[in-house]
Amino acid sequence: MRRETWISFGFMAAGLFLVVAAWFGDEPFTITLATKVVILSLAGVGLNLALGHGGLVSLGHAAFFGLGGYAMGILASHAQSFEPLMIGAWALEGTKSMPLIWLVAMLVAALFALPIGVLSLRTSGVYFIMITLAFAQMIYYFAISWPAYGGEDGMSIYVRNSFPGLNTLDPIQFFILCALILAICLVLVDRLVKSRFGMALEAARQNPQRVTSLGIDTFKLQLTAFVISAAITGLAGALYADLNRFVSPSMLSWQVSGEIMIFVILGGVARFAGPLAGATVFIALEHFLGGLTEFWQIWLGLLLLVVILFARGGIIGVLAGERRHG
Amino acid sequence: MLKSLGKIAALTTLLLAGTAHADPVKVGMITTLSGGGAGLGIDVRDGFMLAVKQSGNKDISVVVEDDQRKPDIAVQLADKMIQSEKVDVLTGIIWSNLAIAVVPAAVAQGKFYLSPNAGPSALAGKGCNKNYFNVAWQNDNLSEGAGAYAKATGYKNSFILAPNYPAGKDMLTGYKRTYGGDLAGEVFTKLGQKDYAAEIAQIRASGADSVFFFLPGGMGISFMKQYAASGVDTPLVGPAFSFDQGILQAVGAAAVGVRNASQWSKDIDNPTNKAFVETFQKEYGRLPSLYASQGFDTAALLLSAMGKADVKDADAFRAALKSADFNSTRGSFSFTENHHPVQDIYVREVIKEGDIYTNKIVSTALSGHGNVYVDQCKM
Amino acid sequence: MSLSLFFEQILNGLQFGIMLFVMAAGLTLVFGVMGLINLAHGSLYMVGAFACAAVAAATGSFWLGLVASLAAAAIAGVIVEIVVIRRLYARDHLDQVLATFALILIFSEATRYFFGSFPLYLDTPDILSGALTFPGGFQYPAYRLAIIVIGFVVAAGLFWLIGSTRLGIRIRAGESDREMITALGVDIGRLYTVVFALGAALAGFAGALVGAIQSVQIGMGEPVLILAFVVIVIGGIGSIPGALVASILVGLTDTLGRTLLPIVFGTFMDNSAATSTGSALASMLIYILMAAILVFRPTGLFGARG
């Protein structure tokens, strides 16, 4: 195996060890924190597919993260109030079942990503960054002023949704569930990246003219990557809303887009475990520094700066010691 | 290992002898200590800590955490306080949307929540809970006070504006409830908006005889400065949030003379308030704000209940809280059936005292005022 | 809506737009010449406002504060360029985004460390306070008129600087061919520092001017930063004329949208719902404008490259 693979697995093993230790040491909050890391990593895995492998720097992934969250919130609230959700003529029953909610969350995110992708892919570079931001901001402002589901207040669902055979309110069980989903998505994305599709996507990032001259439609390629990426981030949004039992427009804000992007860059762009490493380090620092000083963000900023200036290729890149192409 | 990462921003244990009750009370305070809204959280914390310190009660310990004004962070901190810190009482949240995210889950797990600032209608009506006590106000209260003042003054044609989000809409509803006159215009602004030229032009053109606005924080500072510069002289009224001690200095002369509604003012004449204003200034080197008084009262209420009942006996402790047997900085204070304050709402006027801009009380807008959501609340 | 109210709203849009231009000009220059995405541009706006407020409070003179805002932001710009930004020119945009995001954290919390958590006081100078009354009874705040004038003077100065001075020739050369002007003996490192300091000074200047009628507080730079990015993207990155047109377009769209949309909705909805829906749509309007322009012109109105 390559050194990067070893490091990735070592990293995950260490994380799991910490969680197990926390479980035996009766530290439920550490497990909750680890669950947060896992879910945000999943959002990062989604973005990494578009940003790292596809070269599509989206500053609008909070839209998909938040849409996933709202899919959860809306379905669960209708299930709790026993009022069907009316979409045009047909009525949709709410649900508290996680697998169903996840499916809807991914579908909703993908459905939004399709037109956003079609329009955004007309641009590239910084224009792409900004047009994706524009779409996310539209959804954000809509959510704030739309009264039906709480507006800026958001909505609480009080009890976590259910998964057959599990007590999802138990921190360790919910953690295991999220960790399994992350693992599955990591494997799927990894296989996708190494497939013919992934190769072509990578090639389209590095040299679109050459790929086009081979008769491959780069637009379709990138659009597909963008939509899959959005669906994964949407799934993460549904999980995140379930972790907090709460969803609000703050999940849609551009700061969230920025944070997910920072996880990816900090961990290492287009690296298998990059988002996981980035999210772990960022959240651990946030948590640890926050306990030391009221002005912890200064130190967080300085640390980030040092990493970016002196450790090229993110955390995984530095540890693995190999540079990626392009 | 991650245990060592757990942060305890302030752990207060005090030396002097306290009350006789055996079980200590652990308080978890989740409030905003960083970023643009930090001033409010810092004031609540400082007011709370001042009361704890003055009481000399060694059976109370307080864990303080920064929510960064993000609802998801606040929810996670609440989980931490309940799961790891095993607190008995939660408090500290400044913003309504954060309170709505945190409070229902916390009280459902049997914790007490004492609100030192936010009072959304959702938690006063159908969403009320026997373990949730609001020590500040129901969100509509100060706007109702402003509306009552407008009515008493004889205003008949108000122009009203607030940001387009739930708290903003609540405020306008509260004003309309007691005001009763016509509306020259009703405008919702963008949340976080800093330029009000367009709205001020509309006010000028509307022929209104008064302007009611709810624009907390930087939004209010911007609005008042621009309003003063615009040459429009229609009188302003508003709830106290835009006239708070913390931001008045930033507004400066533009605010002088403006009437605002508040349940507290530094010149309320009672011994508790006098001592509070004096000791707060001595301790922290600045004048206390509305938020500081609310933090102080929250701690005073909690301490009074600790003197009467054991926190492990939830029913007794709840009854002790409900009796509100403490000396409030606002004078008379009791709870409605949905655990929100019954208190006087004053009309204050912004004045310049030496070099400092502050408020003085002009009249009482509403006496012994409760809230309209009592009937919707079934505990 | 009466004609004079409409005219007043046009002026308001113009004033909002021209301040956005002063802010966005530096951003677009830095991107055009150095290829750098600088998220910390909003922090320099904040530095300018705080410097102006602090100096105005200490000396009692708004004008000295304004000078201080230019100086403080330029100095902060030079320091940041030499210590951090310089190392980022050769990196890809992602590294730049992360590094300048880190700078935002440092700037914001360091400012809070030195100035406290409460907003600072900064008011308009006495001679510009109050409103001017025009023939026909039309009133408009003197300070806002001054801002419009100053904004256009700055714009004219920039056009002159870029179009007719040696520095401008170098800047334009740097935009089109970096290697060539190095080969011609121009100290490219120093040119970059100067351009960055110029952009920083403009941002700080805008922060001080706007701070006088808004609030001087931590985090004031980020909303403006987003708007400035919207402006430079609509205008076409690197283009000063593009930034000017785009900023006025954004200013007018936002201001007129806020006032006209509720009226438009009021024609077929009841009053309260119309103001609510209208203002919701108004807050999304500039993003709709940006997306629409980019869909039809993927490199902005005046942009040449992606």
Image (cartoon, grey):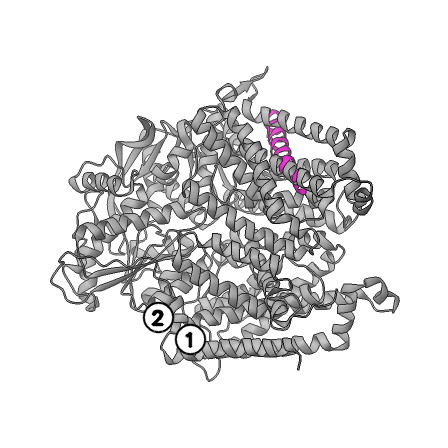
Measure how far apart labels 2 and 1 are at the Cα level: 10 Å
| Chain part drawn in magenta | C1-29
Asked which quadrant contains residue B266, the reply is top left
Query: On the image, numbered disc 1 is attached to which residue?
Result: A171
Taking the magenta stretch, the answer to whether it contains residue C13 is yes
The image shows residue B102 at horizontal and vertical percentages of: 38, 61
Is B105 above or below relative to A302? below
Is A255 above or below relative to A83? above
Residue type, numbered disc 1: Pro
Q: Which mark is residue B347?
A: none
Which chain does the numbered disc 2 sit on?
Answer: B
Q: Which mark is residue B83?
A: 2
Taking the magenta stretch, the answer to whether it contains residue B286 is no
Q: Residue at the left extreme?
A: B20
Residue type, numbered disc 2: Gln
The answer to whether A139 appears left or right of B46 in the picture is: right
Is C58 above or below relative to B64? above
